Every structure is written in C-alpha cells, then in structure tokens.
Image (cartoon, rainbow, N blue to C red):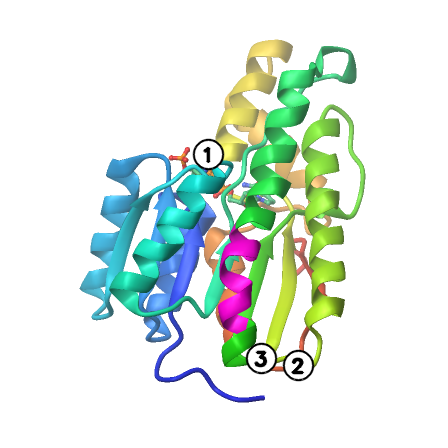
Amino acid sequence: MTNPPGQPVALVTGAGRGIGREIALALAREGCPVAVAARSSDQVEATAATVSSLGVPSMALVLDVTDERAVAQGVAAIVARLGRIDVLVNNAGIAESAPFAKTDTALWERHLRVNATGPYLLARAVLPAMLERRWGRVINIASLAGLVGAPYVTAYTASKHALVGFTRALAAEVAGKGVTVNAVCPGFAATDIVWNGARNIAARTGKSFEDAVEAMARLNPGGRLIEPVEVAAVAAKLLRDDSTNGEAIVLDGTA
Ligand code: NAP
C-alpha cells in the first residue's frame, strides 16, 4: 500500500461536540490537518480553533450531511484549502428513542437520512480521489445498535445496521486498492445523546437523571459508559493500520 503524500488530511463530520470533537483532536495530535463539519457554526469554529492550537491546519465547515449539494461544495472547499481528503470520518449522527407505535415516518426517515444516507453522500464525494491516489481511510462511527437490537430505537437501530452493512460492502469493493473502510461500534457513550436520553427517561418514568444514566451504562456489556476519547483512540489507530478492512470494531466498556 502506498502512503499519502505528507500528513493525511482528515474530514470529521459531527465534530462540533461529543465523539466527533475528540476524533478531530486525536487526528490532529497524529499530525493530520483536520476539517470539522456540523450544522452549528459556533461549535465547529470552537473545535477548529482547538485543532489549530495543536499546531496543524484546520477548517470549520457548516454543513448538513443530508444535503447533497452542500456536501459537494464542502468537499470542494476543503480540497481548495487543505489540498485533499485522505481520511473521512462519518461521525455525524442523531439518536431519538420512541416506542415503535410512536415511530412516525418523519422520525424514521430522519434517522436513515442523517445516519446512513449522510455517510453514503460523503463517501461518494471523497472516494474517487482516494482510489486515484491509492490511499484512504473511511471510518464510520456506527454503534452497538448497528449489530444488535434493543427496544424503543427501531429507527436508530435500522439506520446503524444500514451503516454497518454499507461499511462491509464498500470495504469488499475497495479491498486491495489502498483504501480501507471500517465501522466503530460503541455502546452508550458519555455525550449529549446519553444525557438527552436520560432526561427523557427521567421525564417519562419519574427516575432521577442520575439513575437513568446509570441504567443506560448498565446496558453496556462492560457496565459503564464509553468515553469519547476511547472511540477517538480507535479512529487514530485505524489511521496507521493498512490491513484492517470491513470490520465492525466493538467498544463495549469491557476494558
Ligand atoms: P452528539 O454529541 O449529539 O454529536 C453529534 C454531532 O453530529 C454534533 O456535532 C451534531 O452537530 C452533528 N450532526 C447531527 N446531525 C447532523 C447533520 N444532519 N449534519 C451534520 N452534522 C450533524 O452525539 P455523539 O454521541 O458524539 O454522537 C456521535 C456519533 O456517535 C453518532 O453517529 C452516534 O450515533 C454515535 N454513537 C453515539 C453513542 C452514544 O451513546 N453517545 C453510542 C454509539 C454511537 P449539529 O447538531 O450542530 O449538526
């Protein structure tokens, strides 16, 4: 496998906060110039400023990953500023819970669009140049929900299973061409997604917020929440790994 010219340039979606922010910082610590994208401009600006403070070029992009034209324009803007995109981290995602009876078409389609179609659009935009250079990484932040089922999250679970399936099929298609495609599958992690979920559970059940967080943590096989830095460490490891392809790497809090 050939190496990228100089330090690989990364694009991390959903990097305004939570897991995506930690991945952007981890890749910056590896020396990668990093473009960070999400819809909230204040948050992407803040992450980009922190990336810059680590001594690598950065770029903040206000981008909705479901908007095909915005994705094409965003990718073009990164290539114009940072030269190319060698590493795509599809991290942007949403997670809303609802009993199936209350899972309306809008909620269903929102999850499929953000969590599965978004990564597809980004991969379509960046993959041809990676294949031409014969070096690239596509890292899809899926979820344990991409591998197993759980109650009250049919839309989220279906979207993350789609993302894992997409990962495996694309990995098979690009195998041997210098590009790897992998998924990272964390259990419940310590971010807004869990804090918001715990607030919902507390409101619906009368449990305290702390008890609701604890109950979610216990659903992870390791009995604790995953830290965003743990997910970021896997992404950083995949950066230097030429041989792992088509994997769904589980982070379940066992360690
Ligand atoms: P988070 O703190 O809510 O961050 C989600 C990020 O995605 C934000 O930066 C958000 O920014 C961005 N985003 C959402 N919709 C977007 C869109 N349409 N276009 C562009 N950006 C968008 O959640 P997180 O926990 O860090 O989640 C990151 C990823 O990890 C998600 O894919 C999630 O499914 C996955 N994950 C999370 C957990 C968990 O328990 N936390 C577990 C397993 C997997 P804006 O709202 O500003 O756009």
Dividing the picture into quadrants, the one containing residue 69 is top left
| Residue labelled with disc 3 | 241
Write the start and end of the magenta stretch as one range: 122-130
What amino acid does circle 2 point to? Ser
Tell me if label 2 and label 3 are in contact, CB under 8 Å.
Answer: yes
Dot 2 alpha-carbon crowd within 10 angstroms: few under 14, some 14 to 19, many 20 or more:
few
What amino acid does circle 3 point to? Asp
Task: Confirm whether the magenta stretch covers residue 128.
Answer: yes
What mark, if any, has residue 243 been given in the picture?
Answer: 2
The alpha-carbon separation of the residues under discs 1 and 2 comes to: 33 Å
Q: Is residue 160 above or below residue 130?
A: above
Q: Is residue 126 above or below residue 143?
A: below
Tell which of 74 and 160 is nearer to you.
74
Q: How many marks?
A: 3
Tell me if label 1 and label 2 are in contact, CB under 8 Å.
Answer: no
Answer left or right for 83 relative to 101: left
Dot 1 alpha-carbon crowd within 10 angstroms: few under 14, some 14 to 19, many 20 or more:
few
The alpha-carbon separation of the residues under discs 2 and 3 comes to: 6 Å
Query: The residue tagged with tag 3: helix, strand or loop?
Result: loop
Answer left or right for 20 relative to 180: left
What mark, if any, has residue 192 been given in the picture?
Answer: 1
Q: Is residue 234 visible?
A: no
- Residue 140 picture location, percent across and down: 59, 55
Which of disc 3 and disc 1 is earlier in sequence? Answer: 1
Dividing the picture into quadrants, the one containing residue 128 is bottom right
- Of the 4 image quadrants, the one containing the C terminus is bottom right
Which of disc 2 and disc 1 is earlier in sequence? Answer: 1
Queried on whether the Cβ of the residue with tag 1 lies below 8 angstroms from ligand 1, the answer reads: yes
